[in-house]
Image (spheres, helix red, strand yellow):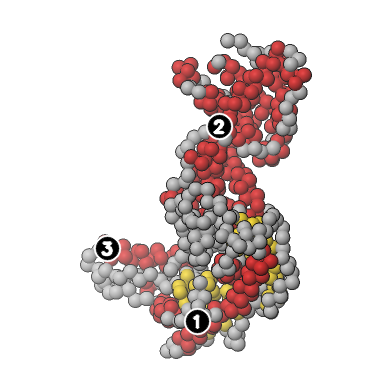
Amino acid sequence: MTDITGDDRHDDILDVYGDYLDRGEQPPAELIEASAENQLAWAALLRVRDAAGSLVDLEAEAAENPLASGWVESILANVQREVRSGRSIPLTHPSPRARLTVTEAAVLGLVRAAGDSVDGVLIGRCVLDGDVEQPGAPVRVRVEASVFWGENIPDRAEALRAAIAHTLLEHTELTVESIDVTVTDVHLRRQAPVDGDGLAPADGDGIAPGDGDGIAPGDGDGSAR
Amino acid sequence: MGAEPLPRPRPCHDHGPCHDHGGRTLAEASDRILAGRAADGDLRAFEVLVRRHGPLMRAYAARVLGSNSEVDDVVQETFITAWKKLPTLDDLSVVKSWLMRIVNRKAIDRIRARHDDRPLLDWDDETPPEQGPEKQAEAQSQREQLKGALDRLPEAQKQCWVMKEVGGFSYEEISEELGVPPSTVRGLLARARKTLIREMEEWR
Amino acid sequence: MTDDDVTTAAGEPVVPSADDELARSLAIAVLGVPGVLQTYDARPVVAAVVADAASALRTGLGAGLPLVKPVPLTPSSPIAVSRGAAGLSVTVKIAVSEERPAAATCRDVYAVVADAVAALPEGGDVDTISVQISRIG
């Protein structure tokens, strides 16, 4: 057994190699082949990297060890205790003694349910932009959504906007100035809830939307009231 | 009653996809969509994120902590923190690396506690007890050999190596997370690599 | 928790305070309003913990001392009733159905609570009646 790392020169070349690798570059061949020490050091470095491969590949290990169901549930149970009601949105009443409100979280849940009732879209983040705690203050509703592959994006965005406008009008007294839908991605839908590739495109006769990144159909023009 | 108002608790079971009342599934949704819903209080979306990224968090925490006894606690704490802080996450599409950062910090906190909260560089002097040669000979593969070598590294070197090679953190991020200058990170990393190489060579 | 909550030496049943009684009857009335799915704990956190501990203590006493007539477990109402200088305050937190407009359900809940409070024999001033919708659907 030869201690090839015993001398400073060897350590130096490992530092040099390390700098290249950290920049995501390969050391130049001339450097590696410049001396026997350099070649040995390079070979040693490669062996460590090979061995490290499986240690570093967390994805593979993770795929083999899905979370136990009870474990996930205990996280969810803990998380449920963390209440995030958000702001208090007033409902009007003639009596001065009445304090009627709906929580922001309840309204966001309502918007989400409305979004989920629209075929072909999945709603993401929803923001109520405006001073919702002041009765009558104008509010802009901004939502992100994903549209299933094969659906007509402007058409789906419009259906989503209509559904949100309808539910907010029915259940709240918010003065909705606009509903802005931003389609942040397009995603594939499984044909059936079966494990497997499941990546067949939607039964879509619609237009393939291609890359939907950052498309905001009708952004800002969707007056709901 | 008794419980505070909650997002609709409608947890999915097993590993099947989560269906909403429209029969569609959240399981294929992007991280950005799921993180947005979870930020707004959708527990089902959060559950999909937990199932999607939890195994990776756990594998990473196991690398950092080097033991399994604290791994589950650290990952659970990570997700509880994530639920609380999700509404403040500006770029929802980076939720995975954001989770990695939280789990990393929680794991390092555990290690700090093991060392009575002394500064990181103090640990660098402490090499864990050498394992006997018989133990080393038992290592059946290069992987196990390297794993053993990693476990024997001084803790500060090991942290840097794991964050860099396993977590994919940059020098700057490691420096920020560990609270030491980038030059120190570079030095620790270089020593970790040399030690690992030496151990691998001895084993050959 | 008041002295009223403690079981008497003679083993008489616990006599809840008038406000506890009111809170419980309000909870029943609120749940009867069309569209109300559920009530949530509206008591301040500390009050809720103390009340639940008192309730558990009563049950424990009942189990441990056979001579004392076991008190049925009467969990405190989630509805918060308090009295201040300006009078009585009631806070209700509810989940409502999306089958009917949430604002209408909210107003009906207010009306039911206001009527019940007005019908109290001792009368008295009402400060505020707060109804919060914490979930819809």
Residue A200 placement (x, y as % from top left): 56, 53
Q: Is residue A52 above or below residue A90?
A: above
The image's mark for residue C109 is: 1
Question: Which one is closest to the eye, mark 2 or mark 1?
Answer: 2
Q: Nearer the viewer, residue B32 or C79?
A: B32
The residue carrying pointer 1 sits among few (fewer than 14), some (14 to 19) or many (20 or more) residues within 10 Å by Cα, namely many
Helix, strand or loop under label 3: helix
**Is disc 3 in contact with disc 1, using a CB cutoff of under 8 Å?**
no
Give amino acid for label 1: Val
Does dot 2 land on a helix, a strand or a loop?
helix
**Same chain shared by disc 3 and disc 1:** yes
What residue sits right under mark 3 in the picture?
C63
Write down the residue under mark 2. Answer: A55
Q: Quadrant of the C terminus of chain A?
A: bottom right
User: What is the spatial separation of the Cα atoms under label 3 and label 2, in whole angstroms?
Assistant: 57 Å
Q: Let me know if residue B50 appears in the view.
A: no
Looking at the image, residue C62 lies above or below residue C124: above
